[in-house]
Image (tube, rainbow, N blue to C red):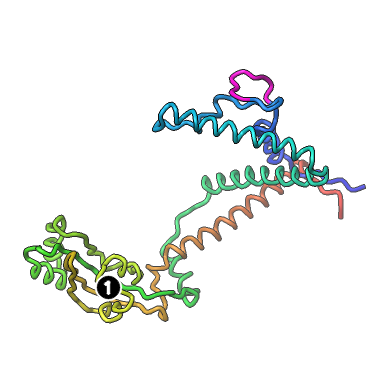
């Protein structure tokens, strides 16, 4: 006869927690503090708290509470009917699924806590660059990118020419001048070092459209457009077509997520190995089959 005794500390803790956190379908020992009953199952007043909303009137609150109670009662009655009418085999299968699901919840939460507490989440520039150089052909753009700065002015703005000149030159004095007058702009962005999707620019600047964007969004181009709502000044620094490889700065968040996920999987793998090794040394985990 084969006999397997597995390392039980974590599983025992999960089982104990499950036993302590019985669901509403398990009968409450007494009716103290109960607001409703279905057979031997009680709904406690404390369980009604989520049903209340301070913004509701007393009358509306009672409607919400009564609906909550009725839904609870229907669940209890349907569960009882299911226990009577579903086959024993199907109920056993459901119980196994529920038990496994609860265990998975606890185990995954425990793993996540260990990772958050012990894993190094710093990713160096060297790691980013190494991964980028080895995999940059795998990073494909699905639309054009652009680096630009722009300002939207009211139609009656005084000194539009000065603002346009400052935005084109964009020296230190120009940047200071623009920042000092920024409160009078409708909206603006002076960060021309970040790559953004062309679709985002089209959404932000209403005079640009899918049809005319290629005419205006060209490298080192400055243009002024207007409509009934305002004037739009745009200075384009650079453009990347969808056929080109995106720069590291643009894909850096994705690479960091990939590297951290790999590190997390390796960290968990080592934890699990150490767990088994410790259990084997302590004679808690033994295998009797070969």
Q: Vertically, is 126 above or below 35?
A: below
Bounds of the magenta segment: 28-36
Q: Vertically, is 60 above or below 252?
A: above
Can the viewer see residue 6 in this picture?
yes
Q: Residue furthest right?
A: 1
Q: Quadrant of residue 114?
A: top right
Left or right: residue 83 compared with residue 138: right
Q: Vertically, is 18 above or below 265?
A: above
Residue 9 on image: x %, y %:
70, 39
Q: How many labels, in total? A: 1
Q: Quadrant of residue 77?
A: top right
The structure residue drawn at horizontal position 59% and vertical position 33%, both measured from the top left corner, is 70
Left or right: residue 44 compared with residue 252: right
The structure residue drawn at horizontal position 47% and vertical position 31%, both measured from the top left corner, is 52
Can the viewer see residue 280 in this picture?
no
Label 1 belongs to which residue? 208
Position of the C terminus, as image quadrant, is: bottom right
Residue 175 on image: x %, y %:
15, 64
**Secondary structure at numbered mark 1:** loop
In the image, 236 versus 169, the foreground residue is: 236
Residue 15 on image: x %, y %:
70, 37
The structure residue drawn at horizontal position 66% and vertical position 50%, both measured from the top left corner, is 272
In the image, 105 versus 37, the foreground residue is: 37
Q: Residue furthest top?
A: 32
């Amino acid at each position: 006869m084969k006999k397997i005794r597995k390392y039980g500390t974590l599983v025992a803790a999960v089982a104990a927690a499950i036993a302590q956190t019985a669901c509403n379908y398990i009968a409450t020992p007494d009716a103290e503090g109960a607001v409703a009953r279905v057979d031997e199952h009680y709904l406690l007043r404390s369980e009604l708290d989520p049903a209340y909303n301070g913004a509701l009137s007393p009358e509306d609150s009672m409607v919400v509470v009564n609906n909550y109670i009725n839904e609870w009662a229907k669940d209890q009655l349907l569960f009882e009917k299911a226990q009577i009418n579903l086959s024993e085999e199907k109920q056993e299968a459901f119980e196994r699924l529920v038990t496994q699901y609860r265990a998975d919840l606890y185990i995954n939460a425990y793993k996540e806590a260990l990772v958050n507490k012990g894993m190094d989440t710093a990713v160096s520039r060297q790691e980013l660059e190494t991964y980028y150089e080895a995999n940059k052909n795998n990073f494909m753009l699905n639309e054009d990118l652009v680096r630009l700065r722009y300002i939207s002015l009211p139609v009656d703005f005084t000194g539009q020419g000065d603002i346009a000149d400052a935005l084109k030159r964009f020296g230190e004095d120009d940047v200071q001048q623009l920042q000092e007058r920024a409160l009078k702009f409708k909206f603006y962005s002076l960060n021309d070092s970040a790559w953004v999707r062309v679709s985002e620019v089209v959404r932000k600047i209403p005079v640009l459209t899918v049809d005319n964007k290629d005419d205006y969004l060209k490298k080192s181009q400055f243009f002024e457009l207007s409509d009934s709502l305002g004037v739009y000044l745009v200075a384009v620094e650079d453009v990347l077509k969808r056929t080109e490889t995106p720069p590291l700065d643009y894909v850096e968040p994705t690479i960091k997520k990939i590297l951290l996920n790999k590190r997390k999987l390796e960290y968990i793998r080592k934890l699990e190995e150490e767990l088994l090794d410790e259990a084997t040394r302590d004679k808690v985990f033994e295998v009797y089959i070969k």
